[in-house]
Amino acid sequence: MLSWEYPPHLVGGLGAHVAEIAPALAEQGVDLTILTPRWKGGAPREQIHPHAIVYRVDPPVERPMNLFPDAQQTNLTLQQFAEELWERSGGFDLIHAHDWLVSFVAEGLKKAHKVPLVATMHATERGRGGGQVHGELATAINGAEWWLTYEAWRVIATSEFMANEVRAYFELPSDKISVIPNGIEPARFQDVSRQDLRAFRDEWALPNEKIVFYVGRLQYEKGLHLLVEAAHQILERGENVKFIIAGRGSMLAPLNQRVMELGIHERVVLPGYISDAERDQLYCVADVAVFPSLYEPFGIVALEAMAAKCPVIVSNVGGLGEVVEDHVTGIKIPSYTLDVLVEAIQFVLNNPAQAQTRAERAYEMVCHDYTWSHIARATIQLYDEIIQARKHVTWE
């Protein structure tokens, strides 16, 4: 398994996905080796399960400044290590790559050893660009994504939305695409919810303030400029609410500036990075989690909120729209609609009993359909199908 991200290096949902599915696969009998660049430390070799080992390989650059050529150079380093590992281990039955950033080593190993390649596409560059490819870097990335999906025996999409996107953008046949969603482990939130969180809550909000929470990357496609404007309107109506917008990204400075311009900095907090523990605790004390994305291939944050029994409001885009059933497990709103976002937040805050009923239904749905053990079983079934099919193919 090849991934550009793995703890302690996490940027978005991709790294979290790999970190969660790896032990779940190992627990069900897969002998798994994970190869990743060592961007932010961590042991060069880590046994995360009796059947799963992570190798972190020192990249040729300290951090990628010129993304595409630095990714290519890093892939060469990964491939050299992978070839040594291949020889020591006696080989592998399958190669599983996560997104284009490790596509070069994945394709090289596939061709050198005639082993099937599986690719999970977590997002696409064209999707982030609203269906267009803007600029030289985006064109290069789009090309790498196309080539990875072309070389893959099977492409995993994390949602039907993502499946449709890769089918349209890369002209893939439908039978080459399998939809296997992200997952969540509800037990971790059960442990948090049993704690006395009153003192923790007091650090973030006054006792009489309700909490609206967002966590994730602060990028334009997450729609957070709309959330700040919604916060301003709600606060102007006299609502006693604290907005917490947590995470890092290119929008952090512009959002902070807009909050200051609107004079709402005491009620809209942008703390930047928060720890996993703080994130999980905030889910448990928040009155609603809001994800107003403009583009979202899956949206694992919605599953996290649901696993914590936190009511959710999401844009009806991409995977977010698939995870949430409107007015059953959460509230769905059209993207780009500030007025509807304002009304949805107020509706949830002013009807807590209804919100909690939806949250309970969402929790039951997550426990039934989205646990990592469930996702691992579906992934292993796909692995087995590909490995068996490979036995009947002559590979010249």
Image: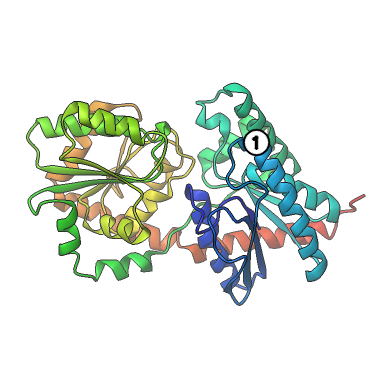
| Image height of 139 relative to 350, above or below | above
| Image height of 200 relative to 164, above or below | below
Identified at 10% across, 30% down, the residue is: 236
Identified at 29% across, 67% down, the residue is: 192
Label 1: which secondary element: helix
Identified at 64% across, 44% down, the residue is: 101
Give 88 or 387, whichever is nearer the viewer: 88
Residue that carries the numbered disc 1 in the rendered image = 68
Occupied quadrant, residue 281: bottom left
Give 351 or 199, whichever is nearer the viewer: 199
Give 363 or 277, whichever is nearer the viewer: 277
Instruction: Give percent across and percent down for residue 71.
Output: 66, 42
Identified at 38% across, 38% down, the residue is: 218
Query: Which colouring convention does the figure follow?
Result: rainbow
Residue type of the residue flagged with mark 1: Phe
Instruction: Give percent across and percent down for residue 286.
Output: 22, 52
Q: Residue furthest front?
A: 62
| Image height of 254 relative to 180, above or below | above
Instruction: Give percent across and percent down for residue 289.
Output: 28, 47
Q: Is residue 174 visible?
A: no
Give the crowd class for mark 1: few <14, some 14-19, many >=20 residues within 10 Å: some
